[in-house]
């Protein structure tokens, strides 16, 4: 399956690359999301971290505050659970774990519910949010994130299927019990590791 060059949108996979099981390579990631593209309102935008925080209070950051954090850049393949993978996407932004450090979780938190505009949300393990390559991206391929790609900020979690990374991200809540997000409620996997092919909830 990793060498499915027969898919109509597929391209040949370079010989030195591997993809997660059941994925086929595409030349570029198609814009894909549920619902409309939200209007950009940078002056009102905030990232809010709540739920079971260490302090018991919610923290909220405006865009300029977050941009004071060290900038990071990653190159990563984007794996959509419908089967396509787009190789070598370049993202830059800030590390999710730098924000976790500013607004840490309380005890017994193993998951977060990451939320975006219009009620989209995804369930993510705290350890995945803390991984070195988990990025709150503001730029894609050197350009500020276009609106349809999730501007001003989107979460990128390279080893998970891309539904786990909300575009138009607005924050997360720390959870002591896992709560299901938009796709997790609709039959998709709570963890969603692409390399383990954790697509569907029946595999849990
Ligand atoms: N807010 C929001 N983020 C989202 C989605 C969505 O519906 N809403 N879809 C996810 C899915 S399923 C995929 S494959 C990627 C697609 O990213 P792209 O449009 O940059 O290719 O966005 C993810 N993030
Ligand atoms: Mo997707």
Image: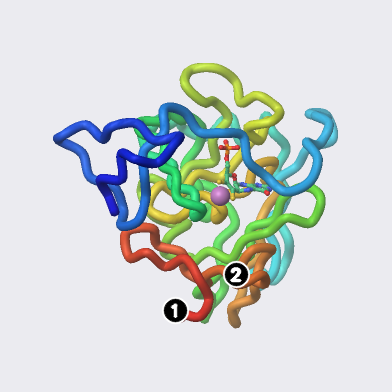
Q: Residues within 10 Å of mark 1 (few under 14, many from 20)?
A: few
Looking at the rendering, the quadrant in which ligand 1 lies is top right
Q: Which mark is residue 54?
A: 2
Residue to which mark 1 is pinned: 203
Q: Nearer the viewer, residue 27 or 70?
A: 27
Where's residue 39, x and y in %?
Answer: 83, 31
Q: Residue shown at 50%/33% (left/top)?
A: 29
Task: Kindly identify the residue that appears in the image at 72 percent across and 48 percent down.
Answer: 34
Q: Is residue 197 above or below residue 15?
A: below
* Mark toward the viewer: 1 or 2: 1
Residue at disc 1, secondary structure: helix
Residue found at x 29% / y 47%: 19
Q: Nearer the viewer, residue 37 or 9?
A: 9
Residue under the image location 66 percent in, 66 percent down: 181
Give the CA distance from mark 1 to mark 2: 32 Å
Q: Is residue 138 above or below residue 80?
A: above
In primary-sequence order, the first of circles 1 and 2 is: 2
Image quadrant in which you'd find residue 42: top right
Give the left or right position of residue 174, taking residue 50 as reference.
left
Q: Is disc 2 placed on a helix, strand or loop?
A: loop
Mark number, residue 120: none
**Residue lying at the far top of the rendered structure:** 143
Q: Percent from the top left, x then y, of residue 103?
A: 60, 57
Residue 141 left/right relative to 87: right
Q: Is residue 160 left or right of residue 104?
A: left
């Amino acid at each position: 399956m990793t060498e499915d060059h027969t898919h109509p949108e597929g391209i040949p996979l370079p010989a030195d690359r591997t993809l997660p099981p059941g994925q086929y390579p595409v030349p570029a990631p198609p814009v894909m999301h549920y619902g409309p593209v939200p209007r950009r309102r940078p002056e009102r935008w905030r990232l809010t971290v709540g739920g079971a925080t260490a302090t018991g209070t919610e923290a909220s950051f405006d865009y300029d505050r977050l941009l004071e954090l060290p900038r990071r850049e990653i190159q990563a393949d984007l794996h959509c659970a419908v089967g396509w993978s787009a190789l070598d996407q370049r993202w830059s932004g800030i590390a999710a774990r730098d924000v976790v450090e500013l607004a840490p979780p309380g005890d017994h938190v193993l998951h977060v519910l990451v939320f975006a505009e219009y009620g989209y949300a995804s369930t993510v393990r705290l350890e995945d949010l803390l991984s070195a390559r988990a990025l709150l991206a503001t730029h894609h391929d050197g350009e500020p994130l276009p609106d349809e790609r999730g501007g001003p900020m989107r979460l990128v979690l390279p080893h998970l299927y891309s539904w786990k990374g909300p575009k138009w991200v607005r924050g997360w809540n720390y959870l002591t019990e896992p709560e299901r997000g938009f796709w997790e409620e609709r039959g998709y996997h709570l963890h969603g590791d692409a390399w383990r092919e954790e697509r569907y909830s029946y595999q849990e």
